[in-house]
Structure formats: C-alpha cells, structure tokens
C-alpha cells in the first residue's frame, strides 16, 4: 500500500481515538477528586504545550502525517534531543489527562489502545525516517522514543 495512504490512515485512526476520549461521557467508575481532576488538566495543558513547541521545532519538516518530507532535515535539537517523538509524548499526556478526569473504565480502555497505537505509529514512522535520513538510526539508538531518560548521559 502507498505510504502516503498508510500515513493518512494513521491520522484518521488517531482522530477517532482522540475524538472518542473527548466525547465519551464522564462516568463514576472511580472517584475523581479535585486533585485528580487538577492533575488531569495539568497533563492536558502540558501536553498541548509539548505538541506546540515540538511542532515549531520541526519547522519545514512538520507534516500532518507520519510520512517524512523530503524537504526537511532530521531534527535532533530542542525537545528532540530528549525524545524522538515529543509530539506523540504530548498527545499521550493529553490522553492520560483526559482519562484521569473521566472516571471511566471505557476511557481507560481507549487510552490503553492509544498507547499501543502510538507505539505502532512511531515504529512505522521510524522505518520511513530511517529510509529518508542517513543519521536516523544513530539518533534512534541514543534517544528514547517517548519518555526522556534524564539519568542517562549520551
């Protein structure tokens, strides 16, 4: 299948997952005290900031799909120095924040599916990045996928 088509399929599935998390009704499967709700809002805000900063950091290399652009360059600075996919890290923070606030096991199941989905999407994208950028394999070997490891020195 054409890699651009696959890229748009990933975008569509991502939209469905995020839409479900936003639109699913709140429930009372677990208590959502104000501290948990506040943590959820903080994670959502942090995730939005991460997505914004990481998107700006890509510059010309930013695309709506996980298919790398030929006119871009491999970005390994800014947030990309700490993780390979800071946009996905930000989206996953939003997913966790929405789930904490929801009080819903259904939302929790969607969030778990989102984690697996983003792992698969990132792996697919990394294969394309390896094809496009000669230094990607070295970068990937030294930089974690989603969660920074501040205790590990390069």
Image (spheres, rainbow, N blue to C red):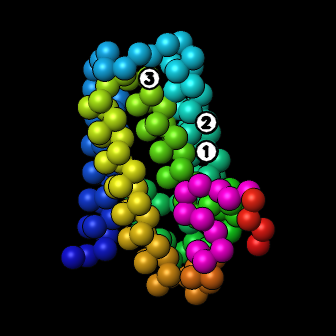
Q: Is residue 135 above or below residue 123?
A: below
Give the total number of marks visible in the rendering: 3
Residue position for label 3: 101
User: Front-most of 95 and 68?
Assistant: 95
| Residue 33 within the magenta-colored segment of the rendering | no
User: Front-most of 138 and 14?
Assistant: 138
Q: CA distance from mark 1 to mark 2?
A: 6 Å
Residue 65 left/right relative to 78: left
Q: Residue at x 52, y 40 (%)?
A: 93
Residue 35 left/right relative to 26: right
Mark in front: 1 vs 3: 3
What is the span of residues highlighted in magenta in the rendered image? Answer: 140-150
Residue most extreme to the front: 30
Q: Which image quadrant is residue 148 in?
A: bottom right
Residue most extreme to the top: 34
Q: Residue at x 52, y 21 (%)?
A: 36
For mark 2, give the secondary structure.
Answer: helix
Q: CA distance from mark 2 to mark 3?
A: 15 Å
Q: Quadrant of the C terminus?
A: bottom right
Percent of width and height locating residue 42: 59, 28
Main SS of the magenta segment? loop
Residue position for label 2: 46
Residue position for label 1: 50
Percent of width and height locating residue 6: 28, 67
| Residue 104 makes an appearance in the image | yes
Q: Residue at x 63, y 82 (%)?
A: 138
Mark in front: 2 vs 3: 3
User: Front-most of 87 and 62?
Assistant: 87
| Residue 73 makes an appearance in the image | no
Q: CA distance from mark 1 to mark 3?
A: 20 Å
Q: Residue at x 31, y 74 (%)?
A: 3
């Amino acid at each position: 299948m054409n890699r651009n088509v696959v890229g748009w399929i990933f975008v569509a599935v991502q939209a469905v997952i995020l839409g479900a998390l936003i639109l699913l009704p709140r429930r009372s499967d677990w208590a959502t005290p104000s501290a948990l709700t506040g943590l959820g809002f903080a994670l959502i805000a942090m995730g939005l900031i991460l997505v914004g900063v990481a998107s700006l950091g890509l510059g010309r290399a930013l695309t709506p799909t996980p298919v790398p652009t030929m006119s871009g360059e491999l970005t390994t600075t800014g947030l990309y120095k700490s993780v390979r996919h800071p946009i996905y890290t930000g989206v996953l923070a939003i997913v966790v924040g929405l789930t904490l606030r929801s009080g819903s096991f259904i939302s929790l199941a969607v969030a778990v599916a989102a984690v697996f989905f983003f792992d698969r999407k990132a792996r697919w994208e990394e294969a394309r990045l390896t094809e496009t950028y000669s230094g990607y394999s070295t970068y990937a070997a030294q930089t974690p996928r989603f969660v920074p490891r501040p205790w590990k020195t390069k």
